[in-house]
Image: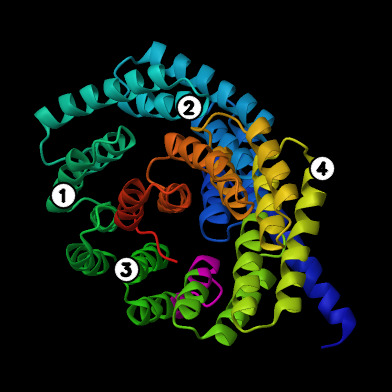
Amino acid sequence: MKAGFAIALLAIAMLCASSLAQEMTAEDWSRKGEDELFNNSSFEGALQAFDKAIDLDSRNATFWLDKAQVHEFMGDRNLAVGAYEEALNLTDEDLQKNPDDADAWWSRGVILDSLDRQTEAKKARERAIQVYNQTLADSPEDGETWFKMAEVLLSLNREDEAIDAYEKSIETNSSKAGMAAITVSNLIAEAGRYDEALKASDRALNLTSPDNIQDRKLALEIKGTILKEAGRPEGALQAFDEALKLDPEDKTSLMYKAQALSELHRYNESIETYQKVIELGANESNWITNALIGKGDALNATGRKNEALEAYRSLLEIKELEIQENPEDSMAWVSKGRALFKMEQYDEAIEAFDRSIEVSPGPYAMSSASDAAWAGKGDALLKLGRNEEALEAYRQAIEIFPLNGDSWHGKGEALQALGKRIEGDWAFQMADKLGYRE
């Protein structure tokens, strides 16, 4: 193609894009933001789209909540808090106009939770349930409301009731039936009932339209994860490959595939897959972090120690740049600690984990890395033989997030190092129940 023709085509495309952007509504931009966030894993793209939505409708609390959560994912806690507070003010205005707006009560609970106001958050969610119950008393076949009810119940850790509500959503053939089935399969798997969870995941696939690529990928990823947790990495790999047929550049499926390949000791293939994630997620910190750690571990397993060290060093350099830009990015600090730990620089790793704990927001904030920092600190202390301190670090991690199998396993190792064999065995059993795998 001649250069002039290519430039002309580009100019036409830009004009079309500009025209389209002018015609897009606030809701269009919001949907684009969700697509950027969940399909493309692009925080920057999502943030730009939600800002466009807010420009067009600045009184919409949902847009502000979406913006706040993207800031959280990006580690910008201060910006997130400002957006959460704006969302809260707008939600309260909505509730003044309509005190029986269940969706607004639900959103209020999410916002308050993110602002570390858990008591108020719980009351808001319980109020949402009351209103949803009123709706369902009049319309028991309202599958959409059953789904919303299930989501709120789940946020209150009422899993059994949530599963019942999701089942009602499925029975009433709501538009959310597929997603309800996907969530049920995941909840059953979290309870360690893997055979039942696999049947539920197959049902989820049957209920999900072949045209709904995003939900089918999610269902396959959950099925693969269930198989992986059940100790069936070959089946897990097959599920992740099925997901990749739907979208060959899906970073989540690629990460899961790389992990499954490592479990099967197919390290060279695992390294190649991690490298693809690194290339696809070049501008996305979360993908780079986990892919470089995974790649380094796979390289170590093949005896390529220098290349592994280079992968960890690359991660360290990336995190140091992020910390320069935002010294209070707790996730960047914990990732720096992980890189230093892998490089066997344990004292420096502890310093990074301590800094992460210092700057981390409350444990309920999405940008909180406090439980991971305490667990990482425990790992480093254990390597240095400081077993009492390691045990305390794991205790702190478990207090923040009791369902982390890694923390329970670390606690078991610290207890056994201290000669407390029975207590250590019990901690190992807890780790196994929570899906811990070497």
Tell me the mark number nearer the camera, choosing from 3 and 1. 3
- Give the residue type at disc 1: Glu
- Give the residue type at disc 2: Ile
Please give left or right for residue 324 compared with residue 197 in the image.
right
Mark 4 to mark 3: distance in Å? 39 Å
Verify whether residue 171 appears in magenta: no
Mark 4 to mark 1: distance in Å? 46 Å
Residue 44 placement (x, y as % from top left): 68, 50
- Decide if residue 66 is in sight here: yes
Q: Residues within 10 Å of mark 4 (few under 14, many from 20)?
A: few
**Label of residue 167 in the image:** 1
Q: Residues within 10 Å of mark 1 (few under 14, many from 20)?
A: many
**Predominant SS along the magenta part:** helix
- Decide if residue 284 is in sight here: no
The part of the chain drawn in magenta is 244-255
Quadrant (top left, top right, bottom left, bottom right) of the C terminus: bottom left
Residue 58 placement (x, y as % from top left): 60, 27
**Label of residue 325 in the image:** 4
